[in-house]
């Protein structure tokens, strides 16, 4: 974990920036990052953050004479082009090609060094401007992106005098931006060294911490149950303080949450004087207005357990966002984080389960709710958010997109559980089958949303509930597990494992899967004992009873355990480990809390990879069916490509980083693909080991009409080629 300290004085608004070039002094002679043939000169290094309101053809830094007014003329030194690309211009009084205030040429017609890609907005970017007597070089994030030869106007004797006449000013017109650590350095100072020193910080919403009570719709809008106290549901969000390299920053800082309108960012107000605050935060079982209870970042992370008391329907159906920001008097956009747009809905209380003791009645209500997710004819299809087609399952096909049919229903599993309480797959071939179920891309949102598989296994359950089973784990605990979110389920399993035997755990897993209508709960419960035990053994082996360990020292043991669980000789790449570190939310040091968070994601993935069909795909390197651990953003960027969206049918496979044990979809594979209309879709592949299909999973995937070309992800450039 990085230990950078937040110092507000190091940050300033772009419009307030003033840079005097005479700071270089007589030591301006020296070598730059190049071959050093430029003679005298200087380097200007700064971290730049431009807001989303930035417009093309805008000046970032203006150059002016010391004696003139700041606003007299506008001669650019650093600017954005019409394509939002960075441009560096020659310097007045130093280069013959320098622009002037009375020039009739457009910027693009003047000599300049330019980057090849658009400048990213709402992100910290390091910019290095190397200005020598005979060349200019532009660096972005430590890399040389453009250079231009120039002609020196004066002699070396006049060089220092000319520099003293020039001053650089931040733009005060079209650009709203911020600057961190602007420095004028001699050419002998390497820009790459300045890039890695003390990077700036940014507050972000952590994707793996978006868990309980949130359901993501296909258009990126979150659906959250709110309203009256008896109906609204908790949801939890994690915010992290990261440096520009994505590492957690160990800085204690108070963060407060508030509810704002998604369209204009204005605060959501109470409907009346005696009404509750729109956004509530839970502390020790009590609810408080979120703005009254800030949460302190601990080791760069803060968890918010929130509820929304105001419905979208009571606010002209406007969407909300949760805004997180610091308690500083000065609000900085890089110290603010926003959730996705939220549609706050009320819960239909008629669909809620009845009292715990009324098993049959509550089950009938739950079945009605489950059937409401099915087609009118009872077939099981969940609609994709980008179209009306559904993927249906049959015993003959992995993924079929057909007219809904009763014959497409999956046969209910009446065989014994395929996994025992220690997480070992039974070898009864008669009770095994491999069928692939595709779920809509609203699975991708959050851990606490209903699993896409939670509406798939409610077949004939009502009659089975009539068989009373003796189970020492009470019905109250079983119902609580079904109704709570991922974190609460995790805590229940931890406590349960310490006292229950394997038979109790197996019975509990069966009861939960029946009540919830989701067999995938059974899988997560049955692997819990081994998951927790191997996690504890791994942590003890790594730390030798210490509280923290360096991440680099933990990597070999994590990789070794992963190979053993996955039964694979293919280990974790550097890119895979960076994804794991992001899931853990740690920097250079790893604590047990961060390790547990990482382990709860990694173990289900490794366990899934131990299965024959996925193991074969993981081991295959040509073509590389599973690239490794890639995020949703990496997959989308790969399929978009630098020259536009890949052709329809191109797809990549990945494990969703937002699904952490004991979420029912933890360890599942995801297909991210380009559809016929060139839009991107994400679908969950749920492997169900009940009947044996001898065909390779690769073959089953390519049978789908929407999947035809395996994409290849470049972990560095995020460009997908096709196989």
Image (spheres, rainbow, N blue to C red):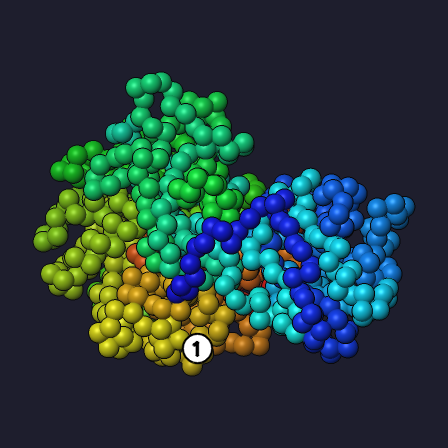
Image coordinates for residue 268, horizontal then vertical, percent: 43, 28
Image coordinates for residue 426, horizontal then vertical, percent: 27, 70
Helix, strand, or loop for circle 1?
loop
Image coordinates for residue 262, horizontal then vertical, percent: 50, 34
Residue at 74 percent across and 54 percent down: it is: 166
| Most foreground residue, 220 or 84 | 84
Residue at 55 percent across and 55 percent down: it is: 180
Q: Residue furthest right?
A: 104
Q: Is residue 168 left or right of residue 123?
A: right
Quarter occupied by the N terminus: bottom left
Q: Is residue 115 left or right of residue 103?
A: left
Return the residue at label 1.
571
Up/down of 193 relative to 379, above or below: below
| Most foreground residue, 356 or 583 | 583
Residue at 28 percent across and 51 percent down: it is: 487
Up/down of 460 relative to 572, above or below: above
């Amino acid at each position: 974990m990085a230990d950078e300290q937040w110092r507000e004085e190091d940050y300033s608004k772009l419009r307030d920036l003033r840079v005097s070039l005479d700071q270089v002094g007589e030591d301006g002679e020296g070598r730059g990052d190049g071959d050093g043939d430029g003679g005298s000169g200087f380097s200007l290094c700064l971290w730049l953050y431009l807001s989303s309101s930035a417009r093309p053809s805008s000046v970032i830094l203006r150059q002016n004479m010391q004696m003139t007014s700041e606003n007299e003329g506008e001669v650019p030194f650093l600017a954005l082009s019409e394509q939002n690309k960075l441009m560096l211009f020659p310097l007045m009084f130093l280069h013959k090609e320098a622009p002037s205030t009375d020039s009739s040429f457009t910027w693009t017609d003047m000599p300049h060094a330019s980057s090849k890609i658009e400048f990213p907005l709402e992100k910290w970017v390091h910019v290095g401007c190397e200005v020598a007597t005979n060349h200019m070089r532009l660096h972005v994030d430590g890399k040389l992106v453009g250079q231009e030869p120039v002609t020196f106007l004066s002699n070396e004797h006049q060089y220092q005098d000319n520099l003293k006449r020039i001053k650089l000013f931040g733009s005060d017109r079209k650009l709203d931006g911020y600057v961190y650590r602007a420095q004028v350095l001699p050419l002998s100072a390497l820009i790459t060294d300045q890039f890695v020193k003390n990077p700036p910080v940014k507050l972000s919403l952590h994707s793996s911490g978006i868990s309980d009570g949130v359901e993501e719709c296909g258009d990126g809008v979150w659906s959250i149950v709110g309203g009256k106290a008896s109906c609204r549901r908790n949801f939890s969000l994690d915010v992290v303080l990261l440096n520009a390299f994505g590492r957690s920053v160990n800085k204690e800082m108070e963060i407060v949450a508030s509810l704002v309108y998604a369209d204009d960012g204005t605060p959501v107000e109470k409907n009346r004087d005696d009404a509750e605050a729109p956004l509530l935060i839970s502390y020790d079982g009590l609810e408080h207005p979120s703005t009254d209870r800030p949460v302190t970042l601990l080791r760069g992370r803060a968890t918010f357990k929130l509820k929304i008391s105001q419905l979208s329907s009571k606010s002209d159906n406007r969407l909300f966002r949760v805004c997180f920001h610091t308690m500083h008097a000065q609000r900085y956009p890089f110290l603010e984080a926003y959730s996705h747009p939220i549609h706050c809905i009320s819960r239909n209380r008629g669909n809620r389960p009845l009292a715990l003791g009324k098993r049959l009645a509550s089950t009938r209500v739950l079945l009605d709710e489950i059937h409401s997710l099915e087609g009118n004819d009872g077939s099981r299809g969940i609609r994709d958010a980008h179209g009306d087609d559904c993927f249906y399952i049959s015993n003959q096909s992995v993924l079929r997109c057909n007219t809904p049919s009763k014959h497409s229903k999956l046969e209910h599993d009446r065989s014994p559980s395929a996994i025992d309480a220690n997480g070992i797959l039974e070898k009864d071939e008669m009770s095994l089958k491999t069928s692939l179920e595709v779920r809509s891309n609203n699975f991708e949102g959050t851990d606490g949303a209903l699993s896409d598989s939670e509406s798939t296994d409610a077949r004939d359950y009502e009659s089975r509930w009539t068989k009373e089973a003796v189970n020492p784990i009470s019905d109250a605990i079983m119902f609580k597990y079904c109704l709570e979110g991922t974190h609460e389920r995790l805590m229940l399993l931890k406590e349960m494992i310490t006292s229950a035997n394997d038979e109790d755990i197996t019975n509990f897993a069966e009861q939960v899967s029946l009540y919830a209508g989701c067999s995938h709960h059974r899988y997560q419960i049955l692997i819990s004992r081994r998951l927790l035990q191997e996690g504890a053994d791994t942590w003890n082996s790594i730390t030798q009873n210490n509280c923290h360990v360096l991440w680099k020292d933990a990597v070999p043991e994590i990789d070794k355990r992963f190979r053993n669980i996955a039964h694979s000789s293919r280990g974790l790449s550097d890119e895979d480990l960076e994804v794991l570190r992001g899931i853990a939310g740690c920097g250079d040091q790893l604590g047990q809390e961060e390790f547990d968070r990482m382990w709860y994601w990694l173990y289900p993935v490794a366990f899934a990879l131990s299965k024959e069909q996925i193991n074969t795909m993981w081991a295959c390197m040509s073509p590389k069916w599973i690239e490794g651990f890639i995020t949703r953003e990496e997959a989308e960027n790969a399929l978009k490509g630098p020259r536009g969206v890949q052709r329809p049918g191109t797809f990549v496979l990945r494990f969703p980083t937002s699904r952490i044990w004991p979420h029912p979809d933890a360890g599942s594979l995801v297909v991210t693909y380009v559809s016929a209309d060139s839009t991107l879709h994400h679908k969950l592949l749920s492997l169900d080991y009940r009947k044996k299909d001898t065909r390779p999973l690769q073959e089953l995937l390519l049978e789908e009409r929407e999947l035809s070309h395996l994409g290849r992800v470049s972990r560095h450039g995020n460009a997908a080629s096709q196989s």
